[in-house]
Image (tube, helix red, strand yellow):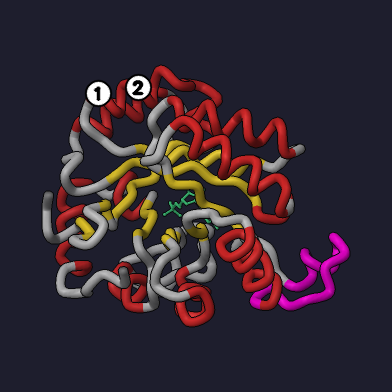
Amino acid sequence: MDPVTENPNLQEPRLIVALDFASGDEALAFARGLDPHQCALKVGFELFVVAGPDLVDRLHALGFRVFLDLKFHDIPNTVAAACRAAARMDVWLVNLHASGGLAMMRAARDAVREVNEQTVLLAVTVLTSSDRATLEETGVQDTPDGQVMRLGRLAVEQAGLDGLVCSAREAAMLRRELGAAPRLVTPGIRLETAGGDDQKRVMTPERALEAGASAIVVGRPITRAQDPAAAMRTIAGRMQGVSPTQ
Ligand code: C5P
């Protein structure tokens, strides 16, 4: 294991590269240029819709751990079935929306545990694209931070999920309230915090880890870099020296 990007306590990768490509071939070609000892890979909606479980199998065959980022939200039985199927594919991380409620999360947790002790089940609390107005539209009167904490507690303390996907800006608050155990996986990472892309509330890799992230998700700063391997090295270097939270 590479001490730079691995969490020595959990032996889990601290860097997850978001494979946001429009085809399985592009994603595979890109993955072949990466080192599975330095990062895990995230497969999201678009890629999974076009390339499916076959792509996940191929990424596993290359030696990568996979985060299946499909953010399930449906009735408990349906979400449990989807999570069971993901756990059978041996994915490392899979996620759902905590706003689906306690029964849904508990059903999903039990389904994952039945088939695979290694698969980590995470909850999304409030999407970083949502603000107070978005919450109000849907009948939620609380602030985004208040709703993040409510759903974070529900997912981790009551449903027994393994952790949360959250903004790095929420990580310190969640660590303080939920302790060291839950995984906190944070997207919205940029090498510099000024400008660029459509991510508005961003943080650097080292600041995200210092704030309590267990692992960071990085997409375009690596996938769109002129030299992705060099971008990986820069990020790994900047993560070095930040000791793991758990
Ligand atoms: O390219 P970039 O680094 O912005 O990619 C971030 C990845 O993390 C994308 O795959 C995006 O879907 C995902 N994500 C996010 N913000 C969230 C949850 C997931 O950017 N709140």
Confirm whether the magenta stretch covers residue 136: yes
Three-letter code, disc 2: Asp
Three-letter code, disc 1: Ala
Vertical comparison of 52 with 226: above or below: above
Task: Point out residue 147 in the picture as x, y percentages from the top left corner.
Answer: 70, 71
Q: Residue beneath label 1, please?
A: 61
Q: Residue at x 55, y 56 (%)?
A: 160
Considering the numbered disc 1 on the image, is that residue within a helix, a strand or a loop?
A: helix
* Residue range (magenta): 132-145
Q: Residue at x 28, y 57 (%)?
A: 14
| Quadrant in the picture for the C terminus | bottom left
Q: Residue beneath label 2, please?
A: 57
Considering the numbered disc 2 on the image, is that residue within a helix, a strand or a loop?
A: helix
Q: Nearer the viewer, residue 185 or 134?
A: 185
Cα distance, mark 2 to mark 1?
Answer: 6 Å
Confirm whether the magenta stretch covers residue 218: no
**Callouts 2 and 1 close, C-beta under 8 Å:** yes
